[in-house]
Image: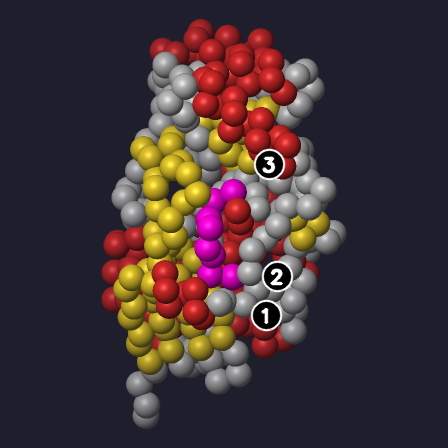
Amino acid sequence: MRIDSVELRMVELPLVRPFRTSFGTEHTRQALLVHVESPDSEGWGECVAGAEPLYSSEFNAASWIAIEQFFAPRLLAAAEVAAIGVAGLLGEFKGHRMAKAAVEMAVLDAELRASGQSLQAYLGGGGTRVAPGVSVGITGTVAELLDVVAGYRSDGYCRVKLKIEPGFDLDPVAAVRALLGEGFPLQVDANTAYSRDDGAHLAKLDDFDLLLIEQPLDEEDIVGHAELARQMSTRICLDESILSAQTAADAIALGACRVVNIKAGRVGGYLEAKRVHDVCLAAGVPVWCGGMLETGIGRAANLALATLPGFSLPGDISATNRYFHEDITAPFVLEDGTIAVPSAPGLGVDVDRTSLDRLTVRTFRQARSRP
């Protein structure tokens, strides 16, 4: 497929409520979108980096520069581009996995639209609906947290994930476990907020029958996670530490995790995410689909990914109204505890141009040079 133009858009979507984690509070989701056009098709991608380098070293302003100055010219100079070849085409440029993932997603969407195939079918997923969990940020008080969790449970979410940090962990988790009752799927996410010295404290979470504890230590501390795994009965899940299928295989071999959170943007795209899934499936390690406050573009792709057989735990996909009053696609709705998986070609969603223009704060477009 020949790429004739690459367009970038920065959009800002106000959140329904502030989302606080151990590394900061978001009031607005700033998302970088990639739009490519070919003679016969078009495709959209979404970069999951944030406005600041807090979750990872990547952030939207840097991703914009990487795509505008390096990735887009490479796409437009190529005689033909296939999604499976994007990683190789951009391979000489170090890092910027989230930006590369957005480019690959846009090319893949265009390619699948042209061939009439859905992303779910292309990845090898199955089923028409996904039962998602919900991620709950850190609140000012435990009472406020209980109100929020009770609301999501009444909405029909089948799993709750709590963000935790030092000083906001044991008491909130105990209160939520009492609210939800024994057996209701509950997990926690530390976003690297603890150190190896906190092992004895974190082991107290074993009393609450958690599905898992996600990324308690620094992303580079694989050995520390392996040591912590020997101190806790609660399963450790790695998120920020998993950057590829190879790092997933290494972490599993070292005993650093028994569950893996797969975020396509973090590992460089949905094709690498599929490879991470395959590694974990072969090792008997369950996976689930993490969320990055995506717009409907990224949410559609995550739903397709979450239908692969290894995704045996509910992910952080959630309905649109969990995050946004207004999105750039038709909203995803939670019905009977599940969300429908798009089945149309490509990502399976169309962008609402009116909403897109209203929410766009910056644009760039580059076209192929004419001979």
For label 1, the crowd category at 10 Å Cα-Cα, with few meaning under 14, some 14 to 19 and many 20 or more, is many
Coordinates of residue 45 in the picture (x, y in percent)? 45, 62
Residues marked 2 and 3 touching at CB (< 8 Å): no
For label 2, the crowd category at 10 Å Cα-Cα, with few meaning under 14, some 14 to 19 and many 20 or more, is many
For label 3, the crowd category at 10 Å Cα-Cα, with few meaning under 14, some 14 to 19 and many 20 or more, is many
Q: Identify the residue shown where x is 51% and y is 29%.
A: 148
Q: Identify the residue shown where x is 64% and y is 59%.
A: 342
Circle 2 or circle 3, nearest the eye? 3
The amino acid type, in three-letter code, at marker 2 is Leu
In this view, the residue in front, 89 or 240, is 240
In this view, the residue in front, 2 or 319, is 319
The segment highlighted magenta reads 322-329
Coordinates of residue 299 in the picture (x, y in percent)? 53, 52
Instruction: Write down the residue under mark 1.
Output: 112
Q: Identify the residue shown where x is 40% and y is 36%.
A: 19
Residue 261 in sight from this viewpoint: yes
The amino acid type, in three-letter code, at marker 3 is Gly
- 309 is higher (above) or lower (below) than 4: above
Residues marked 2 and 1 touching at CB (< 8 Å): yes
Label 2 vs 3, first from the N-terminus: 2
Instruction: Write down the residue under mark 2.
Output: 119
Residues marked 1 and 3 touching at CB (< 8 Å): no
The amino acid type, in three-letter code, at marker 1 is Leu
Instruction: Reply yes or no: does residue 179 show up in magenta.
Output: no
| SS under mark 2 | helix
> Between marks 2 and 1, how big is the CA–CA gap?
7 Å
- Dot label at residue 133: 3
